[in-house]
Image: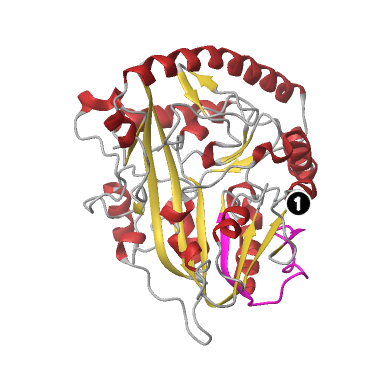
């Protein structure tokens, strides 16, 4: 994807500190296995069937960024703090002063030791090579069935119905085909065709070698979302739905405008983009060590792949000028390690953006999708204020809403790395950064 980007995860050059980081990660993974197995056995034996059922994600856990009083959609709501360790994950976790101060402290720490300037350009230049290394190493082990797609994006599965008619869907940053194959598996629509593209040629080969790959029902090819034009494999304005899941965060920020232009050109009038990505102050952002910060909110992982953490106002600015914003939501979750009595927070942003019909301008978004109740930063402005006085008031009243939320598998008390090994950090068993977005 730089779309070093448009993959689902990460890879790149390996300076000494990156190798050291990887070694430490492997050590942590080994420690995690022992802790995870012991903890899982103990709690699974103690859990009742009712409690197991309560851990399942059955409803959307996303809601508009400025609808704090709206009834939460997620079904795992913590109403009594005494119950926090009774299950593994809770939706719509509140973000308080303690969490905010911790986040600001971690960001300040990272700013003291950014990536050395002489390595920054190397990380950017080697994006494609690193994605290829990642998929060469992991092959189809990186495939994760995104069982949560139907819950969060039911529109995707309207096109698989037998009477849906001719429909074209394009998964951008397809990785191992994490959206393509589940859709085709469920499809009863003989006129559905799914395109899958990725910045990594190795990822595309992984898709093509999947036993479920059928050239009569789908087509996989290499393409960079930040390219100068749309891919030759597709016609302009031919896509009904574009899938953009954990893709935009892998792009360099100076490529975002080109990406928006390509998305607009690909989509039919009235077509839809479904979007999900990392939110500001997500746990994955705060746990980065020194020499990982490339620029504001933009990081390089231990394997050299890059990731950006958005706030909701940035999403409005990116998509709002070309598309009607139908959803601009935050998915916040608290995940707990019941064995060690540790709590951690995650946040993802989710959106649905529709291309206006020919000759029409984007419709005004709902009020609940506009205001970002988050801290001010160099990339966050009160763009919806009519004057400086109003902007100052908005900033003064803002409270941090980009709470972290954790996506752990509903049927597992811990996430897994790309090798199937849990990762431990500060007593919490965490998913690997390459698969955490799948653990919903």
Q: What's the magenta bit mostly, secondary-structure-wise?
A: loop
Residue 134 coordinates in the image, percent (x, y): 73, 37
Residue 206, how many percent across, how many down?
75, 46
Kind of element beneath mark 1: helix
Residue 236 belongs to the span the image colors magenta: yes
Q: Residue 131, image x and y in percent?
A: 74, 42
- Residue 179 vs 144, above or below: the answer is below
Give the residues in magenta: 219-244
Task: Name which residue lies at 51% across and 29% down.
Answer: 415
In the rendered image, the vertical position of residue 56 relative to residue 267, given as above or below: above
Q: Quadrant of residue 52?
A: top left
- Identify residue for label 1: 204
Work out whether residue 316 can be spotted: no
Q: How is the image coloured?
A: secondary structure
Whether residue 98 is in magenta: the answer is no
Which residue is painted at 64% across and 31% down in the image? Answer: 418
Horizontal relation, residue 439 to residue 390: left or right: right
Q: Is residue 311 visible?
A: yes
Residue 138 lies in quadrant: top right
């Amino acid at each position: 994807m730089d779309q070093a980007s448009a993959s689902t995860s990460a890879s790149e050059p390996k300076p000494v500190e990156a190798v050291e980081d990887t070694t430490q990660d492997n050590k942590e993974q080994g420690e995690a296995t022992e802790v995870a197995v012991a903890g899982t056995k103990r709690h699974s034996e103690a859990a009742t069937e009712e409690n197991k059922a309560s851990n399942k994600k059955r409803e959307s856990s996303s809601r508009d960024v400025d609808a704090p009083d709206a009834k939460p959609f997620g079904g795992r709501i913590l109403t009594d703090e005494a119950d926090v360790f009774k299950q593994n994950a809770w939706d719509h976790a509140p973000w308080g002063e303690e969490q905010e101060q911790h986040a600001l402290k971690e960001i300040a720490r990272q700013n003291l030791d950014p990536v050395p300037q002489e390595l920054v350009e190397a990380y950017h230049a080697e994006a494609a090579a690193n994605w290829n290394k990642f998929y060469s190493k992991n092959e189809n082990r990186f495939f994760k069935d995104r069982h949560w797609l139907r819950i969060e994006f039911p529109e995707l599965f309207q096109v698989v119905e037998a009477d849906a008619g001719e429909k074209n869907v394009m998964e951008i940053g397809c990785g191992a085909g994490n959206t393509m194959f589940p859709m085709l598996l469920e499809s009863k629509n003989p006129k559905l065709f799914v395109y899958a593209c990725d910045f990594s040629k190795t990822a595309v080969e992984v898709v093509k070698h999947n036993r479920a790959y059928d050239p009569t029902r789908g087509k996989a090819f290499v393409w960079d979302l930040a390219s100068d034009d749309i891919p030759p494999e597709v016609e302009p304005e031919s896509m009904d739905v574009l899938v953009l899941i954990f893709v935009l965060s892998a792009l360099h920020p100076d490529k975002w405008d080109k990406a928006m232009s390509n998305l607009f050109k690909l989509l039919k009038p009235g077509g839809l983009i479904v979007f999900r990505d990392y939110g500001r102050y997500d746990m994955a952002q705060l746990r980065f060590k020194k020499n990982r910060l490339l620029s504001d909110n933009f990081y390089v992982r231990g394997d050299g792949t890059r990731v950006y953490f958005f706030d909701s106002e940035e999403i409005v600015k990116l998509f709002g000028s070309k598309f009607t914003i139908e959803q601009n939501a935050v998915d916040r979750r608290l995940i707990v390690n019941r064995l060690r009595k540790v709590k951690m927070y995650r946040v993802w942003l989710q959106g649905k953006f529709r291309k206006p019909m020919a000759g029409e301008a984007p419709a005004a978004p709902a009020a609940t999708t506009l205001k970002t109740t988050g801290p001010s930063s160099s990339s966050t402005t009160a763009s919806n204020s009519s004057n400086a006085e109003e902007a100052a008031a908005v900033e003064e009243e803002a409270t941090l809403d980009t709470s972290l939320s954790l996506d752990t598998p509903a049927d597992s008390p811990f996430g897994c790395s790309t090798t199937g090994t849990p990762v431990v950090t500060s007593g919490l068993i965490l998913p690997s950064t390459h698969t955490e977005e799948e653990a919903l």
